[in-house]
Amino acid sequence: MDPIIRISGLTKTYESGLQALKAVDLEIGRGEIFALLGPNGAGKTTLISIVCGIVRPSGGTVTVDGHDIIAGYRATRSAIGLVPQELTTDAFETVWDTVSFSRGLFGKPREPAYIERLLKQLSLWDKRTTRIKELSGGMKRRVMIAKALSHQPTVLFLDEPSAGVDVELRRGMWEMVRELREQGVTIILTTHYIEEAEEMADRVGVISHGELILVEETASLMQKLGKRELTLKLVEPMASIPPELDEWALELRDEGNELLFTFDAKAERTGIASLIRRMTDLGIGFKDLATRQSSLEDIFVRLVHEGESA
Amino acid sequence: MTGINWRGVLAIYKFEMHRFARTLWTGLAVPVITTSLYFIVFGSAIGSRMSEVDGVPYGAFIVPGLMMLSLFTESIFNASFGIHMPRFTGTIYEILSAPLSAFETVLGYVGAAMTKSTTVALVILLTANLFVDVRIEHPLPMIAFLLLIAATFCLFGFIVGIWAKGFEQLQVIPLLIVTPMTFLGGAFYSIDMLAEPWRTVTLFNPVVYLINAFRWTFYGTSDVAVGVSFAITLAIFVICLAVVAWIFRTGYRLKS
């Protein structure tokens, strides 16, 4: 991996004494989509804010494209675009003016053709002369994305990009993120929508109580930790699981109407065939069956709970 | 990016001036009306009973003081509002995450606030000219003092804008401290007209030196030595500059 962001031993303790980050080490590859997951208050926004220059680190180092975020702040900030979690916009500015303002702040010369392309891409072109206060929440979110992209950054931070947006817009943003990645932009997103990370991210990092408890490729994480579940709907409800079925570690659900079998889909023998044979032998009939893959959300919840109980 | 981020400075400057343009009518009409009222009340009603102050007709005598009064309040208001607003709305994130140095950020905000406050001061000068004959004996020092004082009070306003936790606090310093100090600092009278010990007490008010230096550029008369006035103005400027530098170094109320 060719890392564009290197975070080493990053700590942050606020004046209140809250330790928001505890010696975080993380490398993010050039051109990848990295999803940072974690419950509220885990330290996701603090981590992003430090890299972007909004919050001061208490210790550790961060480099972006080889430049230190403090000594070489001009180079690092020029490379970064940020879409913050909150909808913070200037109510009285027009869409065009606010996006042009953002480009100017980053020292870029005027390029109306690029701004036009950007606004069209984000379906904001028709609203270019509209004041931001007159826009809907979803449109304001798009304006914030346009502002973050106005200076053509190579690294884009999206802090909870889907918060409060409808399904259609969310899908549109996912599409845009993929297009940006194809253009070589590195994307780091924090999200509560696990589906979002599962859908888009190349790698996932899970942060809890200021500690990065896991960094893994999404696909391999799903493979490693993702379990498949077989649900058997019984013909007759069962009061308890017969001891003859102990070796499958079944769970009885839905007031004895369902049997749940968790298995490793990658294993040579999943145990499904033998289970069904044994059930037939025991005269336990089932009228329906279904399998499902455990989602990243299940994995995330499990990891955070394990972290809390450790 | 190497050197100064001039485009970033210009972006802040234009943004602030755009805000000024949106309220241009009230921004300029208010000082014109206020100045006219001052001349009706002080110039006609009271001034007619006063002959001259230091050889200057009373109506003309109060012009530099009127300009200073507006310059102080406009500088503080515009600079404090300019930086407080993005803190209040949360858009400050964009300034903090942009490749801008502290100097460039201050230059953008203070430069715009200076433009606005000096424009208002000059509008007052033009309005005053409709009522009285105003002469400027030292035009270049007048411009220099105007800009130095505007820069000083804009820096002070910037500090107030960062210090204030709400819009109410933005008003406290200009209304409760600066305006009374200006009224008591000889904006409408010569401090030589005061009896002791009030004359000596008044000399501890730094605004006295700013107003007198500015009045000297108009009529060549001053209650205090012009050199001392200039040194005190410069000292206040340097103190404000040092406080702003400290704010950016420590991140006081800007960065957690």
Image (tube, coloured by chain):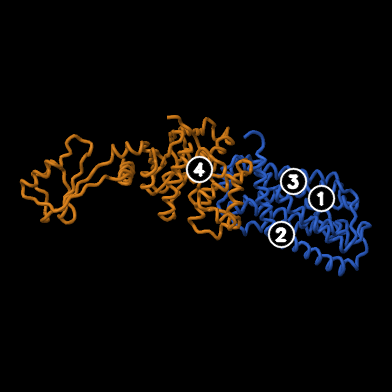
Chain colours: A orange, B blue
Residues beneath discs 3 and 1 located on the same chain: yes
Query: Could you tell me how far apart the alpha carbons at marks 4 and 2 are, in whole angstroms?
Result: 36 Å
Dot 4 alpha-carbon crowd within 10 angstroms: few under 14, some 14 to 19, many 20 or more: many
Q: Residues within 10 Å of mark 1 (few under 14, many from 20)?
A: many
Question: To which chain does the residue with label 2 belong?
Answer: B
Asked if both marks, 1 and 4, belong to the same chain, the answer given is no
Quarter occupied by the C terminus of chain A: top left
Quarter holding the N terminus of chain A is: top left
For the point 67% across and 37% down, which residue is it?
A: B4
Q: Residue at x 70, y 45 (%)?
A: B240
Which residue is under mark 1?
B209
Q: Can residue B88 be seen in this snapshot?
A: no
| Mark with earlier residue (3, 1) | 1
Front: mark 1 or 2: 2
Q: Amino acid at mark 4?
A: Ser
For the residues marked 3 and 2, what is the alpha-carbon distance in whole angstroms?
30 Å
Q: Nearer the viewer, mark 3 or mark 2?
A: 2
* Amino acid, disc 3: Ile
Q: Which mark, residue B236?
A: 3
Q: Is residue B129 left or right of residue A291?
A: right
Q: Which residue is mark 2?
A: B24
Q: Earlier in the sequence, mark 1 or mark 2?
A: 2
Disc 2 crowd, CA 10 A, few/some/many (<14, 14-19, 20+): few
Disc 1 or disc 4, which is closer to the eye?
Answer: 4
SS class, disc 1: helix
Subunit that carries the residue with mark 4: A
Does A255 appear above or below A269? below
Task: Check contact, mark 3 vs mark 1: CB within 8 A.
Answer: no
Establish whether labels 4 and 2 are both on one chain: no
Q: Percent position (x, y) of residue B210?
A: 80, 50
Q: Which residue is mark 4?
A: A49
Residue at image point 18% right, 53% down: A253
